[in-house]
Amino acid sequence: MRGFRDVFGADADNLTQLEASARKIFKLYSVAELRIPTVELKELFVKATGDTTDIVQKEMYAFEDAGGRLLALRPEGTPGVARAYIENNFAQTSPVQRFFYIGNMFRAERPQAGRYREFEQIGAEFLGAAAPATDAEAILLLKDIITDFGVKNYSVKINSLGCAKCRPAYRQQLIEFFSAQKDNLCDKCLSRLQKNPLRVLDCKIDGEKFKNSVPKQQLCGACANHFTEVKNLLEGKINFEADPMLVRGLDYYTGTVFEFLAGASAQNAIAGGGRYDTLIKSMGGADAAAIGWAMGAERVCAARGQNTAAQDKKVFVVCMDQAGNKMAFNLMQTLRAAGIITEGGLFDKNLKTQMKQADRSRANFAIIIGGDEVKNNTAVLKNLQSGEQKTLPITEVATSI
Ligand code: AMP
């Protein structure tokens, strides 16, 4: 099906490695896993993600179940995390929470390179924390994960969207500015103009066109101080650019927003996030400030490319004599118990086929057991790169790899 894929080989390995880097760094930052459901009430995303967003208007896989409930496959993780925070009474029991999630998201977008209909996001959400230090921590957490994974070339943009105090005036200013430019706006921006004028800044066509002339946001004192403090904390720890045109596509953002970009294509956003200080309250929860981000796992993998780090050694066990099958099988288990990656067991096939499979499996060594070896309780250890081989007592194989 278009936009849905089977993931295997190097692609699957890369995703697993990224998840491992993420879990390692999440632990260092004391961020705990939250497993949220794949399916939620459609209403959750309409309210939280926002009914003016492309995600909700055009891209959501929504359906009615047999019980007549309107459900949706999650297009993003933040609404589910916010719902979980409310439903599990965290605001009352333990208001400061640091969660991460790893899971597949679903959006009916036009499939193309780096854009799938089912894709993986790794996300973090810090709830019940309003200080600028939390914003800086969230951004550095993201940086540390992609650095640990091995992404080298990326850039970071940050901005502040202001709060309920300073944003409405800017919104109005933008509506007035763009209304005077109606003839110069693309169709999408014309329809965004009244409902979500900030999104015009985000438009690849109009954002670029009005980059220099559009009025820039004047933050209120509190927002300006907060943003300055975030930038101060980040200074020297990460290269970033403050970009007043960065608005992000979702409705719930307030204050700090940020994006990590790699490469030059339109699908170059590898991760993004921001504050959403009013979302939880607007969903019927407590007045809890929060900030979060999500990275597109496939795009982060593409930004790194193949893993060049040394791989663990791997062994392929070959047996050419029925009488040696048990001995070879036992050796496979002994090697695994010694922490060595081991494949083999195709003992019903001839030597040539087993050796061919050893090459295909990218093993470093083949261990070959034939009639002589069975008799002498030995094995032949063959280095598949150099072709060198030697015969060893079976008990010494594991320590000779
Ligand atoms: P968003 O939730 O829209 O802020 O997206 C966060 C990140 O998820 C983006 O920066 C992308 O890396 C990734 N992403 C979003 N949509 C897709 C998609 N359709 N396919 C693959 N990755 C995506």
Image: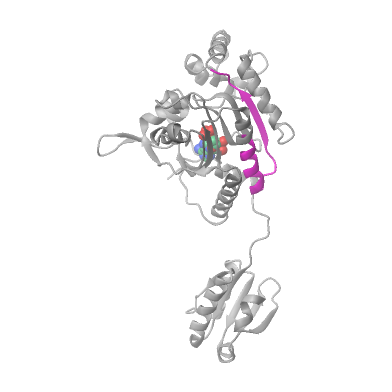
Q: Between residues 179 and 129, which one lies in front from this camera angle?
A: 129
Q: Position of residue 274 (x, y in %)?
A: 56, 29
Report whether 242 appears left or right of 161.
right
Q: Which image quadrant for residue 293?
A: top right
User: Is 269 inside the magenta-drawn segment?
Assistant: no
* Mark count: 0
Please identify the residue farthest to the bottom as the structure is shown: 375
Using the image, determine if residue 104 lies above or below residue 158. Answer: below
Q: Which image quadrant for residue 231?
A: top right
Using the image, determine if residue 163 lies above or below residue 94. Answer: above
Residue at 69 percent across and 41 percent down: it is: 153
Name the image quarter holding the N terminus. Answer: top left
Q: Which residues are magenta?
A: 139-163
Using the image, determine if residue 186 lies above or below residue 261. Answer: above
Q: Which image quadrant for residue 13?
A: bottom right
Q: Between residues 371 and 286, which one lies in front from this camera angle?
A: 286
Q: Position of residue 27 (x, y in %)?
A: 58, 47
Residue at 61 percent across and 66 percent down: it is: 362
Q: Between residues 83 and 206, which one lies in front from this camera angle?
A: 83
Q: Position of residue 7 (x, y in %)?
A: 50, 52
From this viewpoint, is residue 111 visible? yes
Report whether 401 appears left or right of 276.
right
From this viewpoint, is residue 115 visible? no
Q: Position of residue 369 (x, y in %)?
A: 57, 83
Please identify the residue farthest to the left as the structure is shown: 67
Please identify the residue farthest to the right as the structure is shown: 236
Residue at 61 percent across and 31 percent down: it is: 135
Q: How is the image coloured?
A: one colour
User: Is 148 inside the magenta-drawn segment?
Assistant: yes
Name the image quarter holding the C terminus. Answer: bottom right
